[in-house]
Amino acid sequence: MAAAMQRRKLLILENDRALRRELEAVFSDLDVTVCESSDQTLATVRRTEPDVVLFDLGTAHKPAVAAQSLELLRQILNISPDTKIIAMTEHDARELAVAAVGLGAADFYHKPLDAGVLSIVVRRALRIRELEEENWRLRERTGAMALEGIIGVSDAVRSLCRSVEKVAPTNTTVLLLGESGTGKELLARALHRLSGRSHKPFVAINCAAIPDTLLESELFGYEKGAFTGAARRTPGKLESADGGTVFLDEIGEMPASLQAKLLRVVQERSVERIGGRTLVSLDLRIVCATNRALDALIGNGGFRDDLFYRISEVIIRVPPLRDRQGDSLLLAQFLLQQISARLGKPTRGLAPDAIRAIQAHRWPGNVRELENRVKGAVIMAEGVVVTAGDLGLEDPGDDPEYLNLRVARQCAEAQAVRQSLAVAQGNLSRAAELLGVTRPTLYDLLDKHSIDPAQFGRQGARATAEAAEGGENPAKTPVAQSE
């Protein structure tokens, strides 16, 4: 236990020097950083990324000081939301402690100091932090299939799956927006499976696949004798989904004549069959999807704006495969195993040229295109390894640059420096604070990545100009350090 604690970081924010020293002694087995003033705090949090912050909020008898402390607490959590803050207050400042917890503090402690009790409070917060990290590692490990049928480990897919998990338990009407072949029906099924309606029907209707003349009767049903050939009463797809979920795919292709009738279903959860005179009440959840730009359709009169507002209580945007970094190769390997097993082919792998081609291709047809190419490759491949030629793709020749971890780190580092300089408008001290590094380290980074701070604002321009006058490297000029 002690060995694990030594790796944990504790930041102590305390104005009283004697109490600071006492606290350092109590937590001598931790990696302790101390701040005497609030001016240092945010930069220290960025630099050290503490697991726990022990924060003396002061006293409720000084409202201005208390307000500043609460604002600083809020800023700390904004920078490092996973950090556990323990708010220390005087014994008579219970309301201040409650306000701190309301802002996100993990716990509070009333002075005077009792080393044994405070140690328990801090170590409990550290244990919670450890459990959260362990949970996150488990999620990372199992993230290749965040939802059943959804394969991917990219940030885009993780965010998508979290959205589905949040919305699924509700009865909210959901609109899925995404290009063709991105898996919108899989997500609709996941919304149904994770809801309280999972034991009821899931009915999918492709509004673009059914002729306009038949779509109305398919959706709403009809009474006997409603038209020629209507020999008996027939419930529509909406009725057959009663109690469950109806998925209206390609809703943007629905004829304008049916949109008003569908609006009534969405608003009132009732349907009137063709040729009928009575309303049939329905208990269903509606999920819609389209690859069309509905705002453009609304602008030219092709889609009703009132229907759009009804079906878009929650909008989930499904990213195309080209925006899911790393997922195309993962999907290809998964599909290769699945399709090989289904077709009774020997277990196959991907040749190096196939791996390069998959990562370089833009996949305009998204997952559907990838699946079709892999299936064709499994059928046509001569050997047990699938090549770029089998996939019908060109080998780009060189491995993608982002596969080199060193290059990826350098690119991310340079981007972070440029972003901090832009936010700080060229102020080098502020940029270093945002990055959580010292100013000399920032100067080294500027030099390493050949970044000119003059491009980002007045402060950087001044530093560069003064350095040029002295004939020095602007990243290491003493003038810049004096800011």
Image: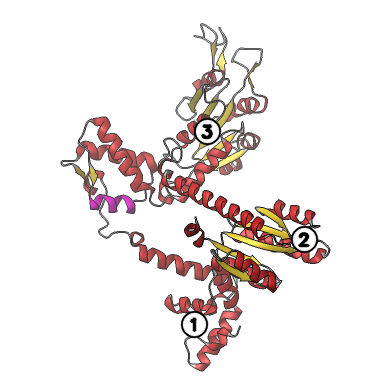
Does residue 347 lie above or below 200 as drawn? Answer: below
- Spot the residue most to the right: 61
Task: Kindly identify which numbered label has been placed on residue 191.
Answer: 3
Tell me, yes or no, whether the highlighted magenta stretch contains residue 81: no
**What element does badge 1 sit on?**
loop
Indicate the amino acid at tag 1.
Ala
Magenta residue span: 351-365
Residue 354 belongs to magenta span: yes
Q: Name the residue that disc number 1 marks.
A: 475
How would you rate the neighbour count of disc 1 (Cα within 10 Å): few for under 14, some for 14-19, many for 20 or more?
many
| Helix, strand or loop at mark 3 | helix
SS class of the residue under badge 2?
loop
* Residue at the image point whose x is 24% and y is 31% from the top: 343
- Prevalent SS, magenta region: helix
The answer for how far apart the CA atoms under marks 1 and 2 are is: 46 Å
Residue under the image location 61 percent in, 68 percent down: 24
